[in-house]
């Protein structure tokens, strides 16, 4: 793909590719030491972890993937972009690279994707860091019922494919006090250069309608991981995945550490990276 738009000062990492058999998945692998595996959501990619990687790679091995359909990975028009398949791809990657003693850093859809893999291979997981995510059915929530009407709209595929709606509009609207600049927003919109490259973001939107039972099943099984050290770092001004989601998570992980970032919205790793990086480093050192 054409990457002339890529700001290599903001994202100064060497590109690596993992052949899944049907597409190439881009990832970065920086530093050495215990592995931190960063798993993004939508409509983002490994770029949104760049500040954390730059800081933490001095002590840890920082691996960040781009799901197929996102970032610098392949974006085939016809592909299984389901959450289940993203989880299977991540699992295949971990096993192929034989990564162990993993600290998972999960954000947004990276939560259900990463938890799915962790529940299948708990022996490989040492710790978890969760950023503004979820892991259960939202069907009973009033906000979800309102959103589901939008998700069912026949206009939604048109907006996603022809207007890059998720990256251009949903992402910047999810920030808290510090708004994203046009220069940085370009790094999130340009990976989806044309309508044929936007099936991945549309599939995640559809997943919110189709996969509620799957999310709930993960939540019901997450106690298998409750003994692992967990840090929740939460942007408290997230307009969608707000503080109530953090409280729900803590009901399943009552011993977890918590960092509440008052100024941040949905992307604390983009909005308050220094604060978050310091908190992650303290958490890692404390749980060695």
Image (cartoon, helix red, strand yellow):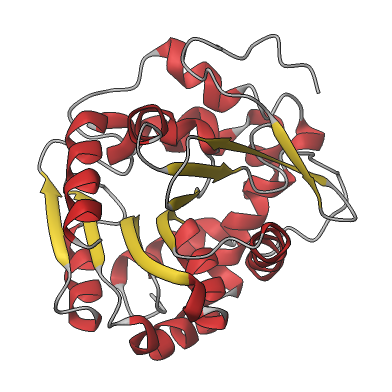
**Residue 34 shows up from this direction:** yes
Residue in the foreground of this view, choosing between 239 and 2: 2
Residue 188, quarter of the rendered image:
top right
Q: Name the residue located 53 percent from the left edge and 37 percent from the top edge.
A: 46
| Residue 66 horizontal/vertical position (percent) | 62, 43
158 lies above or below 117: above
Q: Name the residue located 45 percent from the left edge and 38 percent from the top edge.
A: 170
**Is 193 left or right of 208, judged from the image as shown?**
right
**Is 109 left or right of 160, judged from the image as shown?**
left
Q: The C terminus appears in which quarter of the rendering?
A: bottom left
**Is 166 left or right of 69, judged from the image as shown?**
left
25 lies above or below 127: above
| Residue 107 horizontal/vertical position (percent) | 41, 52
| Residue 118 horizontal/vertical position (percent) | 50, 74
Residue in the foreground of this view, choosing between 178 and 23: 23
Q: The N terminus appears in which quarter of the rendering?
A: top right
């Amino acid at each position: 793909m054409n990457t002339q738009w890529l700001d290599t000062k903001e994202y100064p990492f060497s590109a690596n590719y993992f052949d899944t058999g049907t597409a190439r998945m881009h990832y970065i692998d920086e530093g050495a030491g215990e592995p931190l595996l960063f798993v993004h959501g939508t409509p983002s990619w490994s770029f949104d972890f760049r500040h954390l990687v730059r800081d933490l790679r001095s002590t840890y091995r920082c691996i960040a993937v781009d799901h197929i359909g996102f970032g610098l990975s392949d974006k085939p028009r016809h592909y299984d972009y389901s959450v289940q398949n993203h989880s299977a791809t991540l699992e295949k990657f971990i096993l192929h690279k034989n990564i162990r003693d993993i600290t998972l850093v999960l954000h947004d859809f990276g939560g259900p994707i990463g938890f799915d893999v962790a529940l299948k291979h708990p022996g490989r997981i040492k710790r978890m860091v969760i950023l503004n995510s979820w892991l259960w059915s939202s069907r009973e929530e009033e906000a979800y019922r309102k959103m589901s009407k939008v998700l069912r709209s026949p206009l939604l595929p048109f907006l996603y494919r022809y207007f890059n709606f998720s990256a251009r509009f949903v992402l910047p609207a999810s920030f808290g006090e510090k708004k994203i600049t046009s220069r940085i927003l370009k790094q999130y919109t340009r990976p989806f250069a044309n309508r044929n490259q936007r099936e991945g973001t549309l599939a995640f939107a559809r997943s919110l309608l189709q996969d509620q039972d799957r999310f709930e099943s993960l939540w019901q099984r997450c106690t298998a991981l409750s003994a692992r050290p967990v840090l929740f770092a939460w942007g408290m001004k997230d307009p969608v995945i707000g503080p109530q989601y953090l409280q729900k998570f803590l009901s399943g992980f009552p011993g977890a550490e918590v960092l509440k970032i008052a100024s941040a919205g949905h992307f604390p790793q983009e909005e308050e990276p220094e604060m978050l990086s310091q908190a992650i480093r303290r958490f890692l050192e404390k749980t060695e």
